[in-house]
């Protein structure tokens, strides 16, 4: 078998067999196929696409290129949630405790932020003492005792994906939907959960800018999950506006606590209720209606908040900052951004809002950048809100006063204030299952 022939076959629009995919991935990981040949293959996929069988074969082979996590030591059904990334997306910190309080296990491996998107691991590490690196046995122990645990990605999960992504990043093939699906689902399969909920974001702050592209990606990923024997559902959720009001690491933990106590932002609460209900549905807890009722019950009773406290303590964190969020370290400098005119906010560039947070010190530009856990911004007004000239739009937090000038300029460019109010957009556009697409808006 020769890589040359596989490139030619894909270039002509044909599908590779499972044996051909296995040969290609295994030989590439072993450094027997050069980058220039794999680059040619990726570009052929970009233009020709991949069949369902071919995508599944490639996903499984990439997943099996490294360690496959065995979660059988965890008692009960395990459900994972994956978000395609966004701004202000602190949903894992909220839905993990909710789902655990309802009796379904969540054993989650999360990543760090890069660029304009925040990472769950960075948010958790803003809690003093919190350990995101645990032994596999300790991880299982926390999940069994508390019901959920979130740790950083560890071990040798899907090394083929790391090599392929690095190549896609420099060959303009990152936005190939089949290749995105392979990348996401190979790591989800390797992580070992019984069920997978996919939160596919769409809008200005998301990778998928249109609803239709988000649905196409969701269909590919759901098909991979189901064909690999994992119960899989995808929700298409809005990321045209930052989720919630807080952007930044400890600021987002604070907002997660507020939401678990029943007084979070309406949009964040609604999305989390939908995500958690679908995770419980996958975990066999009943109909979606019944699962939503369970979600509201554990929020109202405080049971979900108690699970967050228990998880923080179990992983070495100081729960005092969760019980009283005023105890989080404060940024030494605070700056208020005010409206330059009166009117309705009709548009926000969500990606730019994430970049503003990074400019203030909350994000990293490279994987080695240090972050300021207390930095970020709180949005007082969002799309649809009316503002008077001089009203506060946002409050910025940073360790140096000099950071505010450029950040304020970027933020002002990221919003539009006009005389007429824009029509309100839905928060959840569609639900994708093995049975098809249910359009919700």
Image: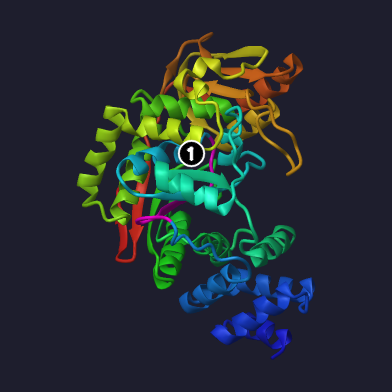
Q: Give the range drawn in magenta.
A: 74-87
Residues 233 and 305: in front is 305
> Between 259 and 46, which is closer to the camera in this rendering?
259
Where residue 294 sits, quadrant-wise, is top left
Residue 32 horizontal side relative to residue 301, left or right: right
CA neighbours of label 1 inside 10 A, class few (<14), some (14 to 19), many (20+): many
Residue located farthest toward the bottom when viewing the structure as drawn: 1
Write the residue at 37% across / 55% down: 75
Quadrant where the image shows the N terminus: bottom right
**Residue 13, image x, y percentages:** 57, 81
Question: Can you see residue 350?
Answer: yes
Residue 110 horizontal/vertical position (percent): 56, 47
The reply to whether the magenta stretch includes residue 75 is yes
Decide whether residue 363 is among the magenta residues.
no
Q: Is residue 313 left or right of residue 276?
A: right
Q: Is 402 left or right of 232, judged from the image as shown?
A: right
- The answer to whether one can see residue 209 in this image is no
For disc 1, the marked residue is 240
- Residue shown at the point (25%, 45%) measured from the top left: 291
Outermost residue, top side: 390
């Amino acid at each position: 078998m020769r890589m040359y022939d596989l490139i030619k076959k894909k270039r002509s629009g044909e599908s590779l067999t499972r044996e051909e995919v296995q040969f290609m991935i295994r030989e590439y990981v072993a450094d027997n196929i050069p980058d220039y040949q794999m680059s040619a293959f990726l570009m052929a996929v970009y233009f020709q696409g991949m069949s369902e069988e071919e995508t599944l074969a490639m996903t499984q082979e990439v997943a099996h290129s490294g360690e496959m996590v065995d979660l059988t030591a965890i008692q009960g059904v395990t459900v994972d949630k994956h978000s395609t990334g966004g701004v202000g997306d602190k949903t894992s910190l909220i839905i993990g405790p909710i789902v655990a309080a309802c009796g379904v296990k969540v054993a989650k491996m999360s990543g760090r932020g890069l660029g304009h998107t925040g990472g769950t691991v960075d948010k958790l590490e803003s809690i003093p003492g919190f350990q995101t690196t645990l032994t596999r046995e300790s991880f299982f122990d926390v999940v069994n005792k508390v019901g959920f645990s979130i740790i950083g990605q560890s071990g040798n999960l899907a090394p083929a994906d790391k090599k392929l992504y690095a190549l896609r990043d420099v060959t303009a093939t990152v936005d190939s939907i089949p290749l995105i699906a392979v990348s996401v689902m190979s790591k989800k399969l390797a992580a070992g959960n019984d069920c997978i909920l996919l939160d596919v974001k769409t809008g200005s702050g998301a990778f998928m800018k249109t609803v239709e592209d988000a649905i196409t990606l969701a269909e590919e990923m759901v098909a991979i999950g189901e064909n690999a024997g994992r119960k899989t559902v995808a929700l298409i959720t809005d990321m045209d506006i930052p989720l919630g009001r807080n952007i930044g690491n400890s600021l987002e933990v604070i907002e997660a606590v507020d939401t678990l106590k029943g007084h979070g932002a309406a949009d964040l609460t609604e999305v989390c209720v939908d995500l958690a209900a679908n995770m419980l549905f996958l975990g066999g807890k009943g109909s979606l209606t019944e699962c939503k009722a369970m979600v509201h019950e554990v929020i109202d009773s405080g049971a979900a908040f108690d699970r967050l406290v228990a998880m923080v303590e179990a992983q070495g964190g100081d729960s005092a900052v969760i019980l009283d969020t005023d105890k989080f370290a404060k940024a030494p400098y605070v700056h208020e951004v005010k409206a330059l005119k009166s009117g309705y906010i009709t548009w926000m560039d969500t990606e730019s809002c994430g970049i503003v947070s990074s400019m203030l010190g909350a994000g990293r530009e490279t994987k080695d950048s240090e972050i300021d856990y207390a930095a970020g911004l709180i949005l007082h007004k969002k799309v649809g809100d009316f503002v008077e000239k001089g009203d506060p739009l946002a409050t910025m937090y940073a360790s140096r006063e000099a950071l505010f000038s450029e950040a304020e300029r970027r933020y002002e460019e990221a919003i539009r204030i006009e005389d007429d109010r824009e029509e309100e957009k839905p928060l959840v556009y569609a639900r994708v299952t093995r049975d098809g697409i249910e359009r919700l808006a």
